[in-house]
Image: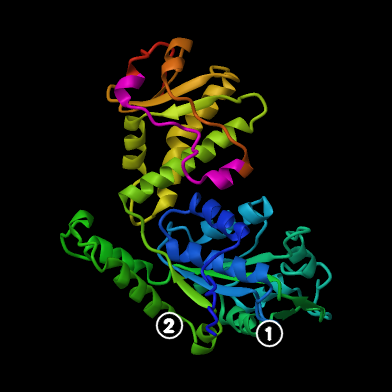
Amino acid sequence: MCIQLMVLDSTLRSSEAVEFEEALRAKIVRQDEAVQAMVDLYQVFCAGLNSPGRPVRSLLFLGPTGSGKTRIVEAAAEILFGDPRAVIKVDCGEFQHSHEISKLIGSPPGYLGHRETHPLITQEALAASHTDKLKLSFLLFDEIEKANDALWQLLLGMLDRATLTLGDNRRVDLSQTVIFMTSNLGGTEITELMHGGMGFIQPEDKPMAGLDVKVARTALEAARRKFSPEFMNRLDKIVVFHPLNREQIAKVLQIELGQVQQRVLETANGQFLFRVTDAGREFLLYEGMDQRYGARHLKRAIERHVVFPLANLLATGQVQAGDMLCIDWDSRVGGLVFWKEDEASRSTVPQPQLVSAQTRKAAGAGDCSAEVTSSAKARSTGNSGSARY
């Protein structure tokens, strides 16, 4: 008698992991390997199969500045805990000297002022982000390459035994903690790869084939030169973040404009909508596109050309709750102009879809509040009542 065996699907994910991945991809552009690493650790933790006596996961994020290394941790915290600041963030630039470790674990008894030195990493701080359904904490060491060797030695025990001994001999359990580390090591070499070094090759002339492989190899080699083999061997995974091209920066622009719209809707008396035309978006991309600085340069351009003018309009009473603004580029002023749309034009223009945070997680990246229309259609409403900046 032949018995037919049913093959199980080991690639199938739980509904919670699928929702987490969709929400994370709606906030993070391009970095598929990093998103996959985040989803994997979440699935393993939810299944209860993380290694006992060790942190849930220890990840080292490498890559150039502005590629999303810190942002993905904050985005995951926002999705899982409801607050992007639900992360214990250690700025390693503040620990460039060995004695500054006391700010992290507290001073031992007997030292002057040891009672006034409160450790940054405590059991209470880790448990602050716990919920009834998810007992998980995020610990982020930002720009780890700037820290003193004493911090790296401290990390060896944390990564290996999931424990941290404070200055007053209290022990902190890290078995329900994900430890993230970010580093810009190899950033200069990566920039030279993209911009042709000292020659005359422009970024658009550089062949994209094989560039990601070269970027990954450059970042890993820089990390191996900087960190000891003992440290590298204790990491569960090393993820390389890749630079963003123009098309990907355009997706980041859509996400950032949606976040600005959400900030507007959360104000006390200025709940209005805005949309940015194609020409306006092209202007923001031109002002904010710099591969050396990544998405951070775009964010500064949005603050300068969109947020600051909107704040002026709101503070001076030129825009009120319920208004619909159009933001367009005007060649006559060489910048963005703002005007209110009347009821007639509003009926012909697609309206931004406002959804709750839970709906945004399930919907993905296509629910940005700032709709895109053509510049010609925007100008058809006229320039009456426009504000120029």
Residue 227 drawn at (x, y percent): 48, 82
Location of residue 311 (image quadrant) = top right
Location of residue 118 (image quadrant) = bottom right
Q: Which residue lies furthest to the left in this view?
A: 200
Q: Residue at 71% of width from left, 75% of height from top?
A: 174
Mark 2: which secondary structure?
Answer: helix
Location of residue 338 (image quadrant) = top left
The answer to if 362 sits in the magenta stretch is: yes
Q: Please indicate, yes or no, whether residue 389 appears anywhere in the rendered image.
A: no
For the magenta stretch, what is the residue range?
359-378
Residue 307 drawn at (x, y percent): 50, 34
Label 2 Cα neighbours within 10 Å, binned few <14 / some 14-19 / many ≥20: few
Count the marks: how many?
A: 2
Q: Residue furthest front?
A: 1
Please state which of residues 27 and 308 is positioned toward the viewer in this rendering.
Answer: 27
Please state which of residues 301 and 20 is positioned toward the viewer in this rendering.
Answer: 20
The quarter of the rendered structure image containing the C terminus is top left
User: Is residue 161 placed above or below 146 in the rendered structure?
Assistant: below
Residue mark closest to the camera, 1 vs 2 = 1
Mark 1: which secondary structure?
Answer: helix
The residues bearing labels 1 and 2 have C-alpha atoms spaced at a distance of 23 Å
Please state which of residues 237 and 67 is positioned toward the viewer in this rendering.
Answer: 237
Provide the residue designation for mark 2.
Answer: 224
What amino acid type is highlighted by mark number 2?
Arg
The answer to if 108 sits in the magenta stretch is: no
Please state which of residues 96 and 277 is positioned toward the viewer in this rendering.
Answer: 277
- Image color mode: rainbow
Label 1 Cα neighbours within 10 Å, binned few <14 / some 14-19 / many ≥20: some
Provide the residue designation for mark 1.
Answer: 161
